Image: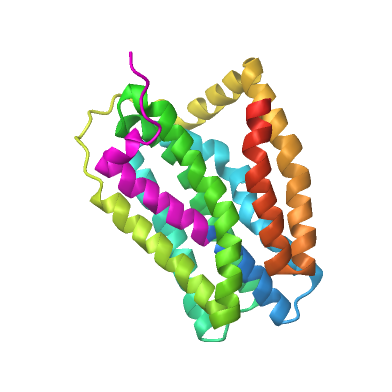
């Protein structure tokens, strides 16, 4: 059997549209993080508030990652994707409007950032689960790899774009770009038409959640992946928070660029 081209999934219109939407949303998310931290520096917020931006962004993934995975398996994934992007679009739009009106406060910023993180936490497992339904079976490895590209490219490009935009137009413009990216993501999901599938009897939410936890506990390869991920993310998050307290645009940009370059090589080597 001939090996599938790594770019073959881009020939599928539905995959290409959703992939571009994911890339735009991920870039907007990283831009928003830098814009939020710079806004807090401008208003003279304490160091605690500045470092809490990182917490507000990543805490939803820790809190809701497992329930989001259950929802991706138990409900219509198009609807779950739509709900996730609507949450993120709503939070980012409110943040942009409040910022342009000059009534944004540090607490309000953290609240909107947390809601945005909730949308991202719900979106991530659903997007991974959707990929096999978008491309032929032989293209799934290539489609999954291209999906990872959106994360790493956004991590490298988002903070850099945010730095330029903050310098040119201020933090409100960064929030507006992020809101526009998520609105376009909502539009992309709405344009995704797929054949209706008959849904069988769903496993109860709680039962499905504990089944997933039991599987994870009993799967050594999953445990190894989770351990390596934790060993990387925990210290990296601390470095991001500390450096962003010092100089949000420059420090975060270079640290995330380095992370984007080093993480794929580290993961493949292990």
Depth check, front residue: 36 or 52 = 36
Residue lying farthest to the left in this orientation = 195
Residue located 59% across and 59% down the image: 114
197 left or right of 108?
A: left
**Where is residue 127 drawn, in percent x and y?**
42, 40
- Please determine whether, in this image, residue 235 is positioned above or below residue 156: above
Residue located 42% across and 31% down the image: 142
Query: Would you say residue 223 is visible in this rendering?
Result: yes
Q: Is residue 94 magenta?
A: no
Predominant SS of the magenta segment? helix
**Where is residue 12 drawn, in percent x and y?**
27, 38
Depth check, front residue: 31 or 74 = 31
Residue located 53% across and 72% down the image: 174
Magenta stretch?
1-28
Residue lying farthest to the top in this orientation = 1
Q: Is residue 22 magenta?
A: yes
- Please determine whether, in this image, residue 243 is positioned above or below residue 201: below
Give the image's coloring scheme.
rainbow
- Please determine whether, in this image, residue 144 is positioned above or below residue 60: above
Quadrant occupied by the N terminus: top left
Query: Would you say residue 95 is visible in this rendering?
Result: no
130 left or right of 226?
A: left
Where, by quadrant of the figure, is residue 9 drawn? top left
What is the tally of numbered marks visible in this picture?
0
């Amino acid at each position: 059997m001939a090996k599938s081209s790594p770019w073959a999934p881009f020939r599928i219109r539905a995959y290409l549209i959703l992939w571009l939407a994911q890339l735009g949303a991920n870039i907007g998310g990283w831009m928003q993080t830098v814009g939020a931290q710079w806004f807090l520096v401008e208003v003279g917020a304490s160091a605690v508030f500045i470092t809490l931006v990182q917490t507000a962004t990543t805490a939803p993934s820790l809190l809701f990652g497992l329930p989001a995975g259950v929802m991706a398996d138990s409900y219509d994934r198009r609807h779950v994707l739509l709900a996730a992007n609507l949450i993120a679009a709503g939070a980012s739009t409110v943040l942009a409007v409040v910022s342009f009106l000059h009534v944004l406060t540090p607490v309000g910023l953290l609240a909107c950032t947390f809601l945005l993180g909730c949308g991202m936490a719900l979106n991530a497992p659903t997007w991974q689960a959707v990929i096999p339904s978008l491309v032929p079976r032989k293209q799934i490895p290539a489609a999954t790899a291209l999906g990872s590209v959106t994360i790493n490219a956004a991590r490298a490009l988002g903070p850099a774009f945010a730095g330029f935009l903050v310098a040119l137009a201020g933090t409100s413009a960064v929030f507006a770009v992020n809101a526009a990216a998520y609105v376009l993501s909502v539009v992309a999901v709405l344009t995704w038409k797929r054949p209706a599938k008959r849904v069988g009897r769903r496993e109860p939410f709680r039962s499905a959640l504990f089944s997933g936890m039991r599987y994870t506990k009993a799967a050594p390869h999953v445990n190894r992946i989770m351990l390596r991920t934790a060993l990387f993310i925990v210290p990296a998050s601390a470095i991001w928070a500390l450096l962003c307290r010092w100089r949000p645009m420059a420090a975060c940009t270079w640290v995330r660029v380095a992370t984007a370059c080093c993480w794929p090589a580290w993961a493949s080597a292990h």
